[in-house]
Amino acid sequence: MSDIEARVRSLESILSEKGYIDSVAVDQIVEMYQTKIGPQNGAHVISKAWTEPDFMDWLKNDSTAAIHSLGYTSRQGEHIDAVFNSADVHHVVVCTLCSCYPWSVLGLPPTWYKSPPYRSRVVMEPRAVLAEFGLSLPTKTRIEVHDSTSEVRYLVVPERPAGTEDWSQERLAKLVTRNAMIGTELALSPGALS
Ligand code: FE
């Protein structure tokens, strides 16, 4: 067992002995985040918006309701604002204060999202940070950085890749990565799947 695993195990057994938590419930929550809640939920939202104009309109007008209609309502997803990339503007999400993140559609945040360098630098020099992720945007593209809070989480809706006009929703969903929905990369190009 690693140090952190040992520490988590001790905390869990103390809390369980004192009757504050139920180990079965803890296992169920872990299982839920491993199998049911993750970036596949956000990819579903986005591929549906790409293929259904009515759903896209709903997502633009009331993101929270549109996302909740698909059953993605778990903790840290109570209020979500979808932001839409275009040729003119690229959106990227951070929580400068801590690590607020839309769990219901993206699952648990990656380690870098919680790291102090990402949280401070993406605000000061977003273009340079995105370049380090391998995303070099044209200088004419404006970058908007969204600071999440405990009240509002953001979901980036990437542009639908060219050459996917006749694709099914399921196939399109495979092009939508977790990082694309945070804004540190674009949706994959069709060639990436072959
Ligand atoms: Fe936070």
Image (spheres, grey):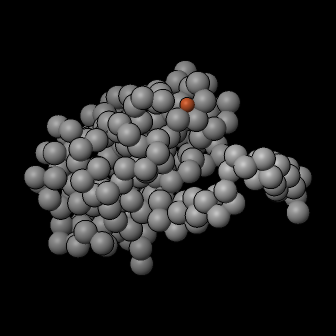
Which residue is painted at 82% across and 49% down in the image? 14
| Residue at 59% in and 40% down | 113
Q: Name the outermost residue toward the front.
A: 19
On the rendered image, what quadrant is the C terminus found in? Answer: bottom left
The quarter of the picture where residue 57 lies is: top left
Corner quadrant of residue 9:
bottom right
Give x and y (percent) for residue 120.
61, 25
- Side of 13 relative to 124 (left or right): right
* Count of numbered marks: 0
Question: Residue drawn 64% across and 43% down?
Answer: 112
- Please indicate whether residue 156 sits to the left or right of residue 31 in the image: left
Placement of the N terminus among the 4 image quadrants: bottom right
Position of residue 76 measured from the top left corner of the image (x, y, whole percent): 47, 41
Q: Whereabouts is ligand 1, in terms of quadrant?
A: top right
Q: Residue furthest left?
A: 54
Q: Position of residue 8 (x, y in %)?
A: 79, 51
Query: At x 40% / y 31%, what residue is drawn?
Result: 152
Percent of width and height locating residue 183 = 44, 43
36 displayed left or right of 22: left
Visible in this render: residue 156?
yes
User: Looking at this view, is 179 or 152 the one in front?
Assistant: 152
